[in-house]
């Protein structure tokens, strides 16, 4: 997973030129929309389309409140300020949290986030007048995991399902033939910043499926802090380029601990780190003990309502990468 896979489609420069040309040809004088998440795939798709269309590409970024620490600000910084893209930033945090209140079922959470995302997206898109195209950062593994080409459906609401069904937008998917590490090569060539080039995959339903059980504002802020520590320590140890994903999960169980001489009853955080090529299979990462120790010590110190940290030592299959 070090970005060393041969770019199978000839030179990366040619790939970019070809895609830019074909987006120009297809869209002509029209306009295109892009649902920008700040993840690697949608970022690369957006930058390619921006090269082709300039101001006629409109990116919509929905902050559903289920993102990791600092993400919404970073998206604005990179795409609005640096790349000068036409970016519509939608703060929909309250709306999603309201819809998720009281919901514990994992597929229900996925369904709600997916459904609500499409509604917000549609509402914003309608305000923009006539637009005929949608740029999407679908990559090869999305196609396989969603069973679009390959038979059975693995899990609901993967990236490819996020298309508004009744919007009559024509779909453009420039990254469809690429593996993740090839997308990284394209990202580097396009001049995207290091944090985006090496950003780990992040599920559409976001932290909602990393909080087992009900999603609340308190749990979100707690998980965000714990997750940021995992990310910081993995990067500090220089391991981020070797791992497919590394993150924290907030479990729906509490356990007993001792803090300053008295018994406490606190949350448990699971740390998940995996090595993979395409997420179809994954091995649990053999992280150095010192790194695990730093992560654990920092989480219990900096997130006081957590008093236990566990490390997930299961591979996929049979476990999936996410816990829900
Ligand atoms: P699993 O947990 O199925 O995950 O091994 C495989 C890859 O897919 C991501 N994932 C999702 N992505 N919507 C998404 O957009 C989802 O509902 C979803 N569930 C899992 C996961 O992070 C991993 O990269």
Image (spheres, rainbow, N blue to C red):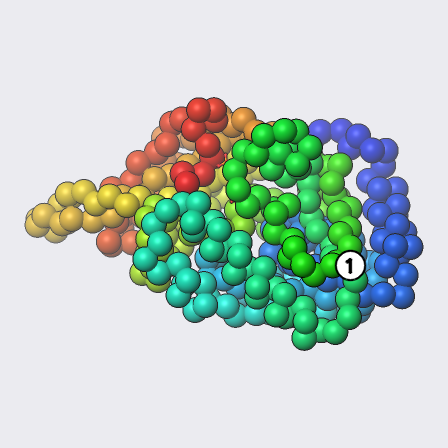
The single residue placed furthest to the left in the displayed view is 262
Please indicate whether residue 91 sits to the left or right of residue 292 in the image: right
Residue 146 visible (yes or no):
yes
Residue at point 43%, 69% (across, down): 94
Label 1, secondary structure: give it. strand
Residue 272 horizontal side relative to residue 35, left or right: left
- The residue at label 1 has a CB less than 8 Å from ligand 1: no
Which x, y percent locates residue 22? 88, 50
Nearest to the observer: residue 309 or residue 252? 252
Q: Residues within 10 Å of mark 1 (few under 14, many from 20)?
A: many
Residue 294 seen in the figure:
no
Residue at the spot 63% in from the left edge and 29% down from the top edge: 151
Above or below, comparing residue 11 to residue 125 in the picture: above
Quarter where residue 8 is shown: top right
Where is residue 205? Give x, y as percent. Answer: 49, 51
Q: Position of residue 297 (x, y in %)?
A: 29, 44
Q: Quadrant of residue 165?
A: bottom right
Location of the N terminus (image quadrant)? top right
**Residue for point 72% across, 47% down:** 187
Q: Residue furthest front?
A: 166
As drawn, 233 above or below 98 = above
Q: Which residue is mark 1?
A: 133
Left or right, 246 with respect to 142, comes to: left
As rendered, which of 4 and 148 lies closer to the eye?
148
The residue at 63%/65% (across/down) is 122
Quarter placement of the C terminus? top left
**Number of marks in picture:** 1
The residue nearer to you, when weighing 49 against 301, is: 49
> Residue 85 lies in what quarter of the image?
bottom right
């Amino acid at each position: 997973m070090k970005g060393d896979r041969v770019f199978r489609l000839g030179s990366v420069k040619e790939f970019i030129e070809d895609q830019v040309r074909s987006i120009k040809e297809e869209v002509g004088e029209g306009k295109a929309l892009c649902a920008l998440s700040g993840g690697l795939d949608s970022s690369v798709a957006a930058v390619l389309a921006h090269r082709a269309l300039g101001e006629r590409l409109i990116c919509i970024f929905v902050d559903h409140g289920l993102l990791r620490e600092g993400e919404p600000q970073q998206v604005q910084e990179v795409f609005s300020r640096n790349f000068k893209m036409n970016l519509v930033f939608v703060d929909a945090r309250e709306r999603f949290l309201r819809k998720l209140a009281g919901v514990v079922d994992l597929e229900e959470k996925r369904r709600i986030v997916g459904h609500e995302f499409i509604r917000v997206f549609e509402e914003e898109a309608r305000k923009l007048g006539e637009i005929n195209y949608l740029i999407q950062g679908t990559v090869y593994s999305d196609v396989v995991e969603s069973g679009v080409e390959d038979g059975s459906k693995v899990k609901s609401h993967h990236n490819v399902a996020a298309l508004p069904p009744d919007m009559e937008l024509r779909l453009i998917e420039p990254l469809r033939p690429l593996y993740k590490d090839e997308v990284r090569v394209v990202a580097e060539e396009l001049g995207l910043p290091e944090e985006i080039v090496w950003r780990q995959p992040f599920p559409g339903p976001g932290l909602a499926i990393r909080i087992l059980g009900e999603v609340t504002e308190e749990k979100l802020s707690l998980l965000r802090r714990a997750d940021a520590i995992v990310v910081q320590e993995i990067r500090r140890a220089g391991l981020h380029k070797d791992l497919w994903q590394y993150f924290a999960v907030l479990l729906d169980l509490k356990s007993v601990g001792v803090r300053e001489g008295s018994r406490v009853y606190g949350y448990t955080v699971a740390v998940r780190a995996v090595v993979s090529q395409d997420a179809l299979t994954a091995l649990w990462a053999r992280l150095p003990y010192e790194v695990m120790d730093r992560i654990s010590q920092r989480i219990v110190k900096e997130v006081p309502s957590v008093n236990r940290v566990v490390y997930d030592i299961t591979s996929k299959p049979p476990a999936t990468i996410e816990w829900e």
